[in-house]
Image (tube, rainbow, N blue to C red):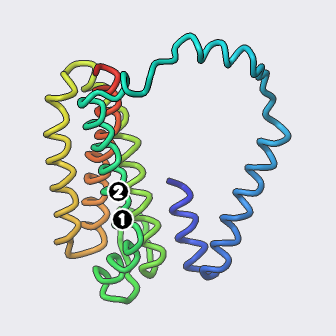
Amino acid sequence: MLGYIIGGFVAEKFGYTTAFVSCGAVYALSGIMVMFMVKEDFNRKVEAKKLAAVKKPFRQLLTPAVAGIMLMVALMGIARRIDEPFLTELVSDVMKGGTEVIDFFFFSIEGSSVFFTGIVSAAAALGGIFSGVAVGWLCDRMLPRKLLIPVLICSALGVVAQLFAPGVISLTVARFFASFAAGGILPILQLMLTQS
């Protein structure tokens, strides 16, 4: 979430090249940290024995219910990512191609579509975080199948609300709620998969 905000700010102030180089530097630093700081006690023979004890034929695991749930997981992954390539264009269209000033209680935020794309994306990430808590709580109290349909409907309504958003604030709110609902789909499907 913070990466979206920082990325939007860096791209707005210093350009796309600097934003991409910054992203690459953070990835490289993370890789170096993992290489030198993570110590694992991995014994290949012990792990192979553990795996052999639970191994089942693939045909036995792939029941029609499991295949249907896995197809839904794949389609959900596509649906959640399909609008990301043109999100900046959507924000630009909503902002009419210019800059916008948004006044909050004690401060205001000014920026172009590049900056507000970061804000909109961060709101979506925040919706996903809250979704994990809320849907996890609901999954403990309801059957996953009864929860899946309302979550799918709410996600679709959030996406439609993004389509008709008249401004960047309404787009941000719609994106938050669409991600809040969509963030609950995968945990529900995983729970259904474990129960199949």
- The label shown at residue 78 is 2
- Considering depth in this image, is 153 or 50 the residue closer to the camera? 50
**Residue name at image x 32 percent, y 82 percent:** 95
Quarter occupied by residue 60 = top left
The mark nearer the N terminus, 1 or 2, is: 2
Residue linked to disc 1: 104
| Callout 1: SS | loop
- The label shown at residue 70 is none
| Callout 2: SS | helix
Q: Distance between the residues labelled 1 and 2?
A: 35 Å
Q: Quadrant of the C terminus?
A: top left
**Residue name at image x 14 percent, y 48 percent:** 153
What residue type is disc 1 on? Phe
Q: Is residue 127 above or below residue 188?
A: below
Q: Residue furthest top?
A: 53
What residue type is disc 2 on? Ile
Q: Position of residue 140 (x, y in %)?
A: 28, 19
Residue 110 shown left or right of residue 130 in the figure: right
